[in-house]
Structure formats: C-alpha cells, structure tokens
Amino acid sequence: MSSTTMIILSAFAAYLVLMIIIGVVCMKKTSSSEDYFLGGRGLNAWVAALSAQASDMSGWLLMGLPGAIYAMGTGQIWIAVGLFVGTVFNWVCISGRLRKYTIEANNSLTIPAYFENRFRDRKKILLLVSSIVIVVFFLVYTASALAAGGKLFNTVFGIDYHVALAIGAGVILCYTFMGGFMAVCVTDFVQGTLMLIGLLIVPIIAYFLLPGNLTDLLDQSGVTNGAAAFLSPLSNGNRPYTFIEIFSQLAWGLGYCGMPHILTRFMAVKSEKELKKSKYIAIVWDILSLGAACFIGVIGRAFLLPTVLGENGASSSESVFIELINKLFTEELALPFIGGIFLCGILAAIMSTADSQLLVTASAVSEDLYHSFIDKNADSRKIVQVSRATVVVVSILAFIIAWNPDSSIMGLVSNAWAGLGSAFGPIVLLSLFWRRTNLAGAIAGIVSGGLTVIIWDYIPLAGGQTLGAATGLYSLAVGFCLSALMIVIFSLATKAPSKDITDEFDRVAAMK
C-alpha cells in the first residue's frame, strides 16, 4: 500500500473512530425507549435539520445523482428538482403538524404507533401492516447504503468489495447499536456538515483547474450529441425527454411525506421555536447540496479526461466524485489527507442514511411488533435490548442483499423510496389534514400503496416486462395516487371517525 493511500486511510480511520466515540457517549445517556427512539424529544434546530437531510440523501447524493448526470447529462436534474420541492413541502407543511399530533396522540414514538393511536386501532392491524412495510423496504434501502460503502472502499483502497462491505456495515452497526437515536442524530449532524463542505469545495476547485474550456472538454469526452445536448435539461442522453420521464423524475418528491427516518426527526425536535429554525437550515442545505451534486457530474466529465468512467475497464459513473477527489488532491494538489477528509464525506452520506434506517427498522420490530404482539409487559430496558438485537439482524440481512458488487445504488434506492413513499406518504398527509380519514381508509391506503410498487416494479405483466419498464412511469407516482384514492374511497364508504378522534384532530388543528 502506497504512502498516499496510507494517509487517506488514516483520515478514514480517524473519522470512523470519532463516530464510534459518539456512540459510546450517547449510550451513557440512553436509559429508556423514548431516549433510544427519539432522543427524549430533545433535538435542537441544527441537529434536527442536518440529521434529517443527511439521513435523507444517502450515498445517492454523492454517488447516484452525480453518476447519472456524468453518464446522461443535466437532464437528470429533474429528480433533484422534485426532491427539493418535496423537502420544502415536508418541512413547511408536515413537520409542525406531525410533531404536535404525535405528542397529542398518546406520545407516539414511531410512525406505526402514531397510526395506531391516531385511528384508535384496537386490533393493531395498522401497527402490524405498517411495521411489515418498514422492515421490507428498509432492508432494500439499507442494502443500497451498504453497497455504496463497499464501492467506496473498493475504489479508494482497492479492498475487495465484500471485505469493504463488511467494514462499513460493522462501523454503522457499532454506533447505532450502542447510542440509538441520539447517536444517529449527532453523527448525522457531523456527517451532514462534512457532506456539504465536500460538495461545495471539490467541484469549485476542479472547475478552476480545468485544462481548457468546459464545453470543448465535454465534446472530447464523447458525450452523446455533443456538449449542448449534455448540458440541456430537456435532453435524455441521445433523445429529447418525454413528459412521462420528466413527470416520473419530479415524482420522487412525493416520497418525502412517507419516509419514517425523516419524519421521526420532526417528532424529536424539542420545541416549535427550534422547528422553525430547522426549516430554514434544511432548505438552504438542500439547495446547496443538490446543486453542487449536479455540478460534480458535469465537472467530473471534463476534469477526469482522458479517463471516461464506465468504459475500458474504468470505474462506473457512480464513482465520479471519488475519482474527482482522488485526481484533484493526490495528483494535482498533493494533499492526500485533505482528499481523505472529503472522501469521508461520501462515507458520511452512506452512514447517515444506513444508521437511520437501521434504527427505524429496529423501532418497528421492538416497539411496534415485539412490545405490541409478543410481550406487552416488556419494560423500556427489554425493548431497547430487542431493538439492539434487531439492528444486528437487519444489518446481516442488508449485507446479504448488497452482496452483488454490480448492484445499482440508484436502482435499490429507487425501489425502496417508491415503496415507502407510496405506502406511507398519502396516509401521513391525509391523517394530518383530512378530518374524515378513518381506520379502514388508512389500512387500504398503506396496503394498496405498498403492493402497487411491488407489482409495478417486480412482476412482469407486460409481455415479459414489468409495468414500470414498459411504461417508463415511476412506480411512486402510480402507488401514491392509488393509495390516496383508496384512502378517500374507503374512508367515505365506511363509518365516520368517532367523536374522540375528531376532537383530537380539532385540538391539534387549533394549536399555534
């Protein structure tokens, strides 16, 4: 191993040790299930905002999105536009109302528990169904983060993908197991800060070190139909975008309303005043990070010449940020330790999502399944023990799913995002803002949304193709709309909510 690689490795080691230390410190402050799942509802504005955004974006932000733009051009920005609109809507319209309602609804600690309390589900059907949806789709989501970590270590250090996969999974498991929600949020705050710094600084330096005109370099890189098409947001590779394609990418924004690992941050903020601050911090972070990630895809295409990623044995396009940092800080500037710190930003993006997903899945299994169906008398200590055991099991299963080194980060994230967004997005939205929503509608919405994505993306019903492949329409758009429709139909066709449910709704609506 070269001296440069050793220096980069030392930066990684320092970063990973810091994450574990945070886990140890937070473990000493974790004494109850509310501490483990929501940090005692004590998050300040900065930690809430950056942990929500860092856990949201994952390795997709620093690998999937820049890689898509590197390969296909700036036409891929429509996903980023959709996500930005979804982020703003989530913080402005959902966050405050959800925080109030989860406190009013018997101090609900998880999203499934909120559904149960909101609709007075005495038979716990909602609890069971929503917990199963979380476990199934978060397994795939966590696997995408572990796969991104494996590719990062493999590209930077030449470590075997499977060994790299084990290293990343082991560190994430360690601090999530120990410190729970507070450890996850504090580490996510550090990670969100590091991600933003790397996203802003690296492409700006690379731009000023370009060995020529940007458009000329893009033409030399062999982009389809030349630099003009590559830089056009209305061009999808070698052809113009269709309405369906743009709509499908914008539809990614619908998923925000149904992401439990993001929604729990809203529930955990310590006051309305802090929540208002969080909105502005999160929105500014989102604008800067999404814009910079898109810029990386464009600059990387020109700066990395004569190498063209994805061709002649070179790394895949999803490694563009990694390759950009390597060339910039080891070859051009001879600052390998600084490069190592920025590479840690990619690791931060990966870890900040995986830890949140592990914790949400653990809460669904321990609090919503184990405590509700297996041991109703379990105390907080027992529930935390079951949660930690779940973190271990889920990590192992996600590790198995991510075993294939050719798995696409973008593909895994896309499927999980669609499943969670379709199953939970409409019911979260309508439960907060439509007084007539009832238990039957909630069950119908979650089941129809989740099943639609599975059928649309995985079952070949159109001449050997899935409906998603045949139509080009993103399953989230279909699942979200169908779920919302089923909620309305079943709610109106069945008995209206009881007076205590509507009174609770009115109390929340009247809160300032």
Image (spheres, rainbow, N blue to C red):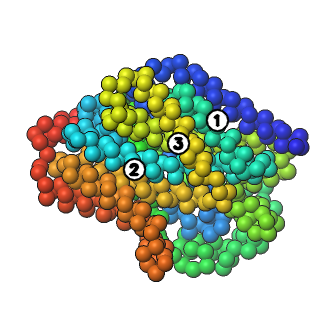
Q: Earlier in the sequence, mark 2 or mark 3?
A: 2
| Picture coordinates of residue 354, whole percent (x, y) | 55, 43
| Secondary structure of residue under mark 1 | helix
Which residue in the protein does label 2 denote? 133
Q: Amino acid at mark 1?
A: Val
- CA gap, disc 2 and disc 3: 14 Å
> Is residue 342 rendered to the left or right of residue 447?
right
Q: Position of residue 458 (x, y in %)?
A: 47, 66
Image quadrant holding the C terminus, namely top left
**Residue of label 3:** 394
Q: In the rendered image of this protein, does residue 301 appear above or below residue 49?
A: below
Q: Quadrant of residue 254?
A: bottom left
Q: Any mark on residue 171, and which?
A: 1
Residues marked 2 and 3 touching at CB (< 8 Å): no
Q: Earlier in the sequence, mark 1 or mark 2?
A: 2
Q: Are marks 1 and 2 in contact (CB under 8 Å)?
A: no
- How far, Cα to Cα, is label 1 from label 2? 26 Å
Real-space Cα distance between discs 1 and 3?
Answer: 14 Å
Of marks 1 and 3, the one in the foreground: 3
Relative vertical location of residue 164 with respect to residue 465 in this rendering, above or below: above
| Residue 266 seen from this side | no
